[in-house]
Amino acid sequence: QSALTQPPSASGSPGQSVTISCTGTSSDVGGYNYVSWYQQHPGKAPKLMIYAVSKRPSGVPDRFSGSKSGNTASLTVSGLQAEDEADYYCGSYAGSNNLLFGGGTKLTVL
Amino acid sequence: DEQLVESGGGLVQPGGSLRLSCAASGFTFKSYWMHWVRQAPGKGLVWVSRISTDGTNTAYADYVKGRFTISRDNVKNTLYLQMNSLRAEDTAVYYCARDFNNWYVRTLGGQGTLVTVSS
């Protein structure tokens, strides 16, 4: 199966909101509510930011929110801060005991 | 603190084998399903494998089936990944991760271990 599709880059100024998309198919994103988002700073391990489409693990700021419509999931970061600059990856269960990730989006805070 | 520490990576020739280890501490290891996820240099995340709490249920990505074997030792609190018939495209940083609410992964800050397959 192919990776989920994300834009390679996104950007916004401090305080603004930015939305990153993640497009899959009816066999993964559209077929299950097992969508997740991960943040990865350079040289660091990825960190789970959103799970089950829109839920936040304990400790993740509520500036991070997730949603899904059809085969496309979205991550919105509101009130952008300098420390939000990182790579973001979406993930989705794809059936048959398989987990897919997106290709990643580099978020730049201008 | 909850922690996962990977080890065992290194340089190996194509066709060779390597066994990765992941030492868990700070939580009840035997209570969690576990995963391996990898990331080629400059590339995105790719899921590799998952194992159940007692080790009887395993799953693999298609591109490693038949070559990689995931296992665990709940006495030693350690997760393993035996990698055979290694290919250049297996070159990556390998992260172990704890399952969270089914099919979500948490690396707990582990730095991963780099596997380089090259002659």
Image (cartoon, helix red, strand yellow):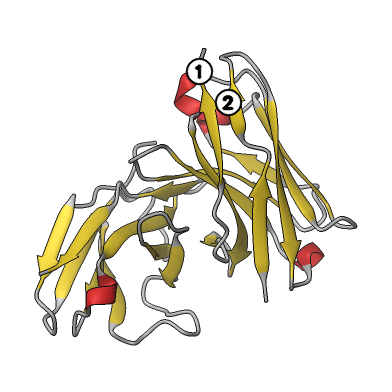
Counting from the top left corner in percent of width and height, residue A94 is at: 45, 49
Q: Locate residue A22: give its quadrant.
A: bottom left
Q: Locate residue B106: give its quadrant.
A: bottom right
Residue appearing at x 30%, y 79% in the figure:
A64
Q: Look at the numbered disc 2 and give the secondary structure of its residue.
A: strand
- Depicted B21 relative to depicted B99: above or below: above
Q: Look at the numbered disc 1 and give the secondary structure of its residue.
A: loop
B99 left or right of B21 in image: left
Residue appearing at x 58%, y 68% in the figure:
B100
Using a 10 Å C-alpha cutoff, classify the residue at mark 1 as few (fewer than 14 neighbours), some (14 to 19) or many (20 or more).
Answer: some
Q: Chain of mark 1?
A: B
Looking at the rendered image, the quarter that the N terminus of chain B falls into is bottom right
Residue appearing at x 13%, y 85% in the figure:
A15
Which amino acid, mark 2? Leu
Q: Chain of mark 2?
A: B
Residue bearing the label numbered 2: B11
Residue bearing the label numbered 1: B118
A34 left or right of B81 in image: left
Whether marks 1 and 2 lie on the same chain = yes
Residue appearing at x 77%, y 64% in the figure:
B29
Count the marks: how many?
2
Counting from the top left corner in percent of width and height, residue A68 is at: 28, 68
- Depicted B119 relative to depicted A58: above or below: above
Q: Say if residue A57 shows up in the picture.
A: yes
Nearest the viewer among B87 and A71 is: B87
Counting from the top left corner in percent of width and height, residue A28 is at: 38, 51
Label 1 close to label 2 by CB (< 8 Å): yes
Nearest the viewer among B111 and A69 is: B111
Disc number placed over residue B106 in the picture, else none: none
In primary-sequence order, the first of circles 1 and 2 is 2
Which amino acid, mark 1? Ser
